């Protein structure tokens, strides 16, 4: 599947049931260079298994990899990153719950956000070749990283890559990783259980398109489902 298509994304979801954005391929094609910044983000996703969804804007969508153990700033750690379907750019603002039984059912937290810059002039060629180097300018992750595709051992294998920190001043060989130190939303400050409890659930397709009110005091928990509104 070439990057820049949302066919798989749409096929896997029932937008009558999930609040995830339907989205569309953005018109703005992004060329390498500094004219326009490319979005980078990570969503922590407590689904069947907890993982971190690593997303890089390219060709009007978000190229996406599911990283079971999350990113590590230790260059010795090579983290499995399963290449999954492109997501719409709108998805980068999504935080909330996906109904049980739906694709990816569970809780989604926006864990990091920022921009990225590819090291290769031709990103499509780098992806095809299976090695993409880049710099992250996130709120939590920084510096140089690489995604490297693993050879398939059987046709049934998934499109497995490794996410690797490259050596620079942002590497971290001891102490806690950022995934261990930072466990709340970079967007709302909420913990996973607070998002799961449905506090300030927002629908990305709400009429005004505005994000939810950020940072409610963590002490008060809304009664589950109490304030949920159906928008459709
Ligand atoms: Mn996911």
Image (tube, rainbow, N blue to C red):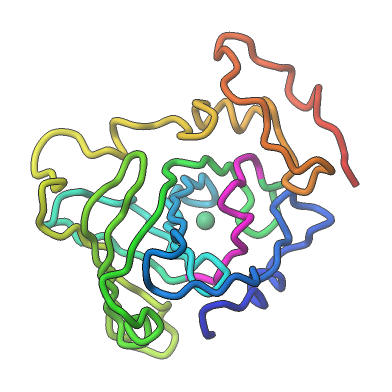
Which residue, as the protein is rendered here, is positioned at the far top?
Answer: 219
Q: Is residue 226 left or right of residue 64?
A: right
Seen at 59% across and 70% down, the residue is 28
Compare residues 224 and 52 and report the one nearer the observer.
Answer: 52
Q: Is residue 192 left or right of residue 126?
A: right
Seen at 33% across and 63% down, the residue is 117
Residue 50 location, x and y as percent?
45, 47
Compare residues 117 and 164 and report the one nearer the observer.
Answer: 117
Residue 174 location, x and y as percent?
9, 38
Which residue, as the protein is rendered here, is positioned at the far right?
Answer: 232
Q: Looking at the picture, does residue 95 appear above or below residue 34?
A: above
* 83 magenta-colored: no
Q: Looking at the picture, does residue 26 appear above or below residue 76?
A: below
Q: Looking at the picture, does residue 219 appear above or below residue 67?
A: above
Total marks shown come to 0
Residue 53 location, x and y as percent?
45, 55
Compare residues 67 and 87 and report the one nearer the observer.
Answer: 87
Residue 221 location, x and y as percent?
65, 15
Seen at 50% across and 47% down, the residue is 45
Residue 132 occupies quadrant? bottom left
Indicate the quadrant containing the N terminus: top left, top right, bottom left or bottom right. bottom right
Q: Is residue 180 left or right of residue 63?
A: left
Which residue, as the protein is rendered here, is positioned at the far front?
Answer: 35
Compare residues 54 and 40 and report the one nearer the observer.
Answer: 40
Q: Is residue 30 left or right of residue 210?
A: left
Report the magenta residues as a range: 84-97
């Amino acid at each position: 599947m070439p990057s820049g298509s949302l066919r798989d994304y749409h096929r896997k979801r029932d937008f009558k049931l999930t609040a995830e954005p339907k989205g569309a391929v953005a018109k703005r094609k992004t060329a390498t260079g500094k004219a326009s910044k490319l979005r980078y983000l990570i969503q922590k996703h407590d689904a069947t298994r907890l993982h971190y969804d690593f997303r890089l804007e390219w060709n009007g969508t978000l190229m996406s990899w599911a990283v079971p153990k999350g990113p590590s700033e230790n260059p010795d750690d090579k983290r499995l990153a399963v290449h999954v379907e492109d997501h719409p750019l709108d998805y980068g603002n999504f935080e909330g719950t996906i109904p049980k039984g739906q694709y990816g059912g569970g809780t989604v937290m926006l864990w990091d956000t920022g921009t990225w810059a590819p090291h290769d002039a031709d990103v499509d060629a780098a992806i095809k070749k299976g090695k993409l180097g880049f710099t992250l300018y996130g709120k939590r992750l920084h510096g140089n990283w690489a995604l490297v595709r693993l050879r398939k051992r059987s046709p049934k294998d998934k499109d497995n890559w490794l996410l690797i920190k490259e050596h620079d001043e942002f590497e971290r060989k001891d102490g806690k990783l950022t995934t261990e130190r930072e466990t709340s939303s970079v967007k709302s400050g909420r913990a996973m259980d607070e998002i799961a409890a449905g506090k300030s659930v927002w629908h990305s397709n709400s009429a005004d398109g505005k994000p939810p009110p950020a940072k409610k005091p963590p002490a008060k928990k809304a009664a589950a489902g109490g304030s949920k509104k159906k928008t459709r």
